Image: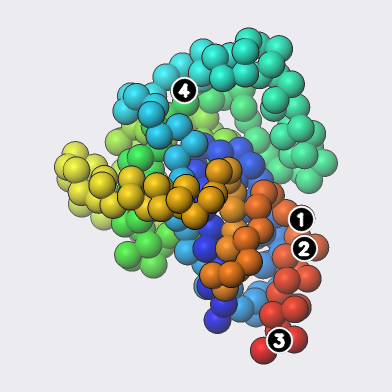
Amino acid sequence: MVKLDIMSDPICPWCYVGKTLLDRALEQSPDHPFEIEWHPFQLNPTMPREGMDRRAYLEGKFNGQEGAVAAYMPLVEMCEAQKITINLDAIQKTPNTLDAHRLIHWAGIEGRQTAAVSSLFKAYFVEGRDIGDHEVLCDIADSIGLDASVIHRLLASDADVEDIKKRDEAARQMGITSVPTFVVAGQHAVPGAQQPELWLKVIEELRTAA
């Protein structure tokens, strides 16, 4: 097996696109060698824990409505070209993702990490749900086979908060400034959302090398 470490954030649209395109490559090559692990990277580590209105957030970040529209146009065009479902109009809030990252971590302990990531992306980018809300996170946990009552108790505590923050900071100290970032075999960094063809080429090269 070859380790594929992925730094991402559940509210990062390019992370959602990047995972979707990677999934398509892995579906075409089901005997791929990758052992995937997801790592926390918060786009907005200083976001209030209650989150904020999405329109206000985007207009503040991109200097007004026109700037926000221009910034998201390449994403919309990519999703249309690749037939990726994304429902940006349904998203009302930009959440703090610390608790979502904690859920991903706990899901990983149970071998359900990728399922958690997939469900969080779907909840946010397709269904427009607030993935900073504990009830939403517990519902997602239940949907992937985790004990929602345990997750509820963990979310109400400070369990693994500092660990997530330290791992986020460690990624930044490695020089990662944007996500998604894929690291193959602990050596080769692949930034950004990549087409399935690139991943199929990487898989073939790994097979040849093996």
Report whether residue 2 is seen. yes
Residue 198's tag is 2
> Which residue, given by chain and number where applicable, does mark 1 sit on?
195
Looking at the rendered structure, the secondary structure element under dot 3 is: helix
Type of amino acid under label 4: Lys
Residue 42, percent from left and from top: 45, 40
Q: Residue at x 52, y 63 (%)?
A: 5
Q: Residue 189 in the image: x percent, y percent?
A: 62, 61
**What quarter of the picture does the C terminus occupy?**
bottom right
**In this rendering, would 28 be left or right of 129?**
right
Give yes or no for contact between labels 1 and 4 (Cβ–Cβ under 8 Å): no
Q: How many angstroms separate mark 1 from mark 4 (CA)?
A: 29 Å
Task: Say if 139 sits above or below 116 in the image.
Answer: above
The residue where tag 4 is placed is: 93
As shown in the figure, which amino acid type bears the numbered disc 2?
Leu
Mark 2 falls on what kind of element? helix
Pointers 2 and 4 in contact (CB under 8 A)? no
Label 1: state its secondary structure.
loop
